Amino acid sequence: DGGITQSPKYLFRKEGQNVTLSCEQNLNHDAMYWYRQDPGQGLRLIYYSQIVNDFQKGDIAEGYSVSREKKESFPLTVTSAQKNPTAFYLCASSMDTGTPSYEQYFGPGTRLTVT
Amino acid sequence: GQNIDQPTEMTATEGAIVQINCTYQTSGFNGLFWYQQHAGEAPTFLSYNVLDGLEEKGRFSSFLSRSKGYSYLLLKELQMKDSASYLCAVIDSNYQLIWGAGTKLIIKP
């Protein structure tokens, strides 16, 4: 079964700690994305990657870092520099960012709570 | 700036029809998506419009008017499972997806 997996579903951390959220896809998609979703707001793009070993900042990249060492994997690290890290994080993938008709497929999300 | 407007919340009755509107002002236009998102879950694709007109897919239809910067999602024969948020997203001239805040649809028996 092809799809995107994110783990864990719920994550709790103390303030000041870095935390890494995993995202894996077996859809053979080139492009992968990380979004943050807060109540009452649209999805906001954190980072995206079109090919292995390359990624670009989205609208709210400050306090986050990513890597794309394998096509299937795009982990997101929420660093202690991120001022308001508590949110619902969604990972997505698509065949290509340059072709507009390719919809994005989303993972189930990770709800991160930092206290 | 870029902006997508959707109503925050709508209520409808089971078996009825509801129309969820989306207006957008973006730098360029390369298509518009509608996604459904149940609470605490991932968004799932519903439709894609790039040309003006109505696209029908079962109980769901999506309409686009590029000249008016306007789209709507029409849901017919509403079922309780249609209670969800509906997200409108526009692809701008840089092929970036700009997301609306979503419309929470509440279905009552």
Image (tube, grey):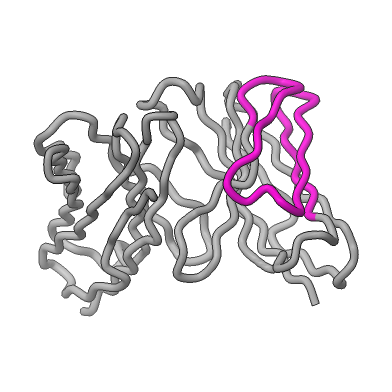
Q: Is residue A109 above or below residue A106?
A: below
Q: Is residue B63 left or right of residue A94?
A: left
Residue A20 screen position, x and y as percent: 82, 50
Frontmost residue, B67 versus A94: B67
Q: Quadrant of the N terminus of chain A?
A: top right
Residue B94 screen position, x and y as percent: 44, 29
Q: Which of the 4 image quadrants contains residue A101?
A: top left
Frontmost residue, B52 versus B93: B93
At 58% from the left and 27% from the top, the residue drawn is A31
At 26% from the left and 67% from the top, the residue drawn is B7
Q: Which of the 4 image quadrants contains residue A22?
A: top right
Q: Is residue A87 above or below residue A1?
A: below
- The magenta segment: A49-78
Residue B88 screen position, x and y as percent: 33, 50
Q: Quadrant of the C terminus of chain A?
A: bottom right
Q: Is residue B17 above or below residue B4?
A: below
At 83% from the left and 55% from the top, the residue drawn is A79
Farthest residue toward the right?
A: A17
Residue B23 screen position, x and y as percent: 23, 53
At 35% from the left and 53% from the top, the residue drawn is B3
Marker count (numbered): 0
Q: Is A40 part of what is drawn in magenta?
A: no
Q: Is residue B97 above or below residue A12?
A: above
Q: Is A67 part of what is drawn in magenta?
A: yes
